[in-house]
């Protein structure tokens, strides 16, 4: 009997107690159903909010890209003054813009048009690069960032001014946009490439030489915060997650559970898999204008080892709230946990509508590293992951590149670290020792 019905025991005869119990039970079931419905509605609102924010950011980005391109046109010395005059379109006039934007649009793509478009777009690229990248030592933006902005620009111009140019087809002539951009990227790489991935810029965990040497038992996985810490570390040292933003954008539906297929050495054993990870081997260029999201990785679950990484991931997934979208959310309070328990969802530890941002996740990862005795940041775990698979015997180059999501050995090399494990592998290869 619920507390609000307790007083009825005194005011009613015993013959009606069973009836009152029944109504109290029904009232409790309705409360549970209402709590579950409220959580579902909240989760749906959170999904719509994230979707709306994403579209608002995209609209703002598209508008800023178009405005910066218009500024390039009005300040360019290669455009006649009459084409710089503001006008509306021949039909509905979507926006008041320089006449050149309308003159260069349409289905007819003459060589003169393509030359002028190449010139304007390359000037715009040079202006865009002046804003610089995130690395203060390198004032140039990364090629992928530039190509994303250029692709956005062509999309905006197609929607508003009927530009029908295809980046990878219409500008491949000598002096065209594509070869000029490729040459610019090559020059930037030769000038500033040495600043990226150098040893001083990468944190190293000196006390361990492989991911298997990391002790996850320091985390009490019955505690919600320490369970999250363990999962963040696992995603770094066993999946090679990059930076705090990749953790923050990690979605719940990217973590899957399955069973190893037939003829696999671990046939029949369950595994945890992270799917749709951003693919490092696929970058935007003038010839590749789309990104794929197909990279995935999996680790086995050994049921008899409660502290194995797979079991910790399974335990964390079971603690996520129904309707939760993001992988990492704030810890749920006692009242919310009780509501979920009343609705039949025992073991929920996290609030589904309060995702944790990348800066807070960075603090949690650093705290987790300190608990393990490491004074490093999150990217050191990715470095340890790559060093482990590169130095291990029997792991092919293709497997290591696919696991780290790198496009080449040269891109992967700054993450690799020579240690006793790699030296012993060399000794065994030369026949100098049989010691494992």
Image: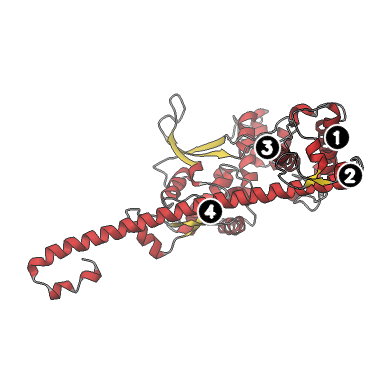
C-alpha separation, residue under disc 2 versus residue under disc 3: 59 Å
Could you tell which of marks 2 and 1 lies nearer the N-terminus? 2
Disc marking residue 324: none
Asked whether the beta carbons under mark 1 and mark 3 sit within 8 Å of each other, the answer is no
C-alpha separation, residue under disc 4 versus residue under disc 1: 41 Å
C-alpha separation, residue under disc 2 versus residue under disc 1: 11 Å
Asked whether the beta carbons under mark 2 and mark 1 sit within 8 Å of each other, the answer is no
Q: Residue at image x 64%, y 54%?
A: 377
Nearer the camera: disc 2 or disc 3: 2
**Res 402 quadrant in image:** top right
Q: Give SS at disc 4.
A: helix
State the image coordinates of residue 351 (x, y, percent, origin top left): 46, 58
Q: Give SS at disc 2.
A: loop
In the picture provided, is 295 more to the left or to the right than 283? left
State the image coordinates of residue 403 (x, y, percent, origin top left): 60, 36
Could you tell which of marks 2 and 3 lies nearer the N-terminus? 2
Residue underneath mark 2: 76
Residue underneath mark 1: 116
Could you tell which of marks 4 and 3 lies nearer the N-terminus? 4
Q: Give SS at disc 1.
A: helix
Q: Give SS at disc 3.
A: helix
| Color scheme of the displayed model | secondary structure
In the picture provided, is 163 more to the left or to the right than 314? right
Could you tell which of marks 4 and 1 lies nearer the N-terminus? 4
C-alpha separation, residue under disc 4 versus residue under disc 3: 52 Å
Residue underneath mark 4: 49
Q: Residues within 10 Å of mark 3 (few under 14, many from 20)?
A: few
Residue underneath mark 3: 423
């Amino acid at each position: 009997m619920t507390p609000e019905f307790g007083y009825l025991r005194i005011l009613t005869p015993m013959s009606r107690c069973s009836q009152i119990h029944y109504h109290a039970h029904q009232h409790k079931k309705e409360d549970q159903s209402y709590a579950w419905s409220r959580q579902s509605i909240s989760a749906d609102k959170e999904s719509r909010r994230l979707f709306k924010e994403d579209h608002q950011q995209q609209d703002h980005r598209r508008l800023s890209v178009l405005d910066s391109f218009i500024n390039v046109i009005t300040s360019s010395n290669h455009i006649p003054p009459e084409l710089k005059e503001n006008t509306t379109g021949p039909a509905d006039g979507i926006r008041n813009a320089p006449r050149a934007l309308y003159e260069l649009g349409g289905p007819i793509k003459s060589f003169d048009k393509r030359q002028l478009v190449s010139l304007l777009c390359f000037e715009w690229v040079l202006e865009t690069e002046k804003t610089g990248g995130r690395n203060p030592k390198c004032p140039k933006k990364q090629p992928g960032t530039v190509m994303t902005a250029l692709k956005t620009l062509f999309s905006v111009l197609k929607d508003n001014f009927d530009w029908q140019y295809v980046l990878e087809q219409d500008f491949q002539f000598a002096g065209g946009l594509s070869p000029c951009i490729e040459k610019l990227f090559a020059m930037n790489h030769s000038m500033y490439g040495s600043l990226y991935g150098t040893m001083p810029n990468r944190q190293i965990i000196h006390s361990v030489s492989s991911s298997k040497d990391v002790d996850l038992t320091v985390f009490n996985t019955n505690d919600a915060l320490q369970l999250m810490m363990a999962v963040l570390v696992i995603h770094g040292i066993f999946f090679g997650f990059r930076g705090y933003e990749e953790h923050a954008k990690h979605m719940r539906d990217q973590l899957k559970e399955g069973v190893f297929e037939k003829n696999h050495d671990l046939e029949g054993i369950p595994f945890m898999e992270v799917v749709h990870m951003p693919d490092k081997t696929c970058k935007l260029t003038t010839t590749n204008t789309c990104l794929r999201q197909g990279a995935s990785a999996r680790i086995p679950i050994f049921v008899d080892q409660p502290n194995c990484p797979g079991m910790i991931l399974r335990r964390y997934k079971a603690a996520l709230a129904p309707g939760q979208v993001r992988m990492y959310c704030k810890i749920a309070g006692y009242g919310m946990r009780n509501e979920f328990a009343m609705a039949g969802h025992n073991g929920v530890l996290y609030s589904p509508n309060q995702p944790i941002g990348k800066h807070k996740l960075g603090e949690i990862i650093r705290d987790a590293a300190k608990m393990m005795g490491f004074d490093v940041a999150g990217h050191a775990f990715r470095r340890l992951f790559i060093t482990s698979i590169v130095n291990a015997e029997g792991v092919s180059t293709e497997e290591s590149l696919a696991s780290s999501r790198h496009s080449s050995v040269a891109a992967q090399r700054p993450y690799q670290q020579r240690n006793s494990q790699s030296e012993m592998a060399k000794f065994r290869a030369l026949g100098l020792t049989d010691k494992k």
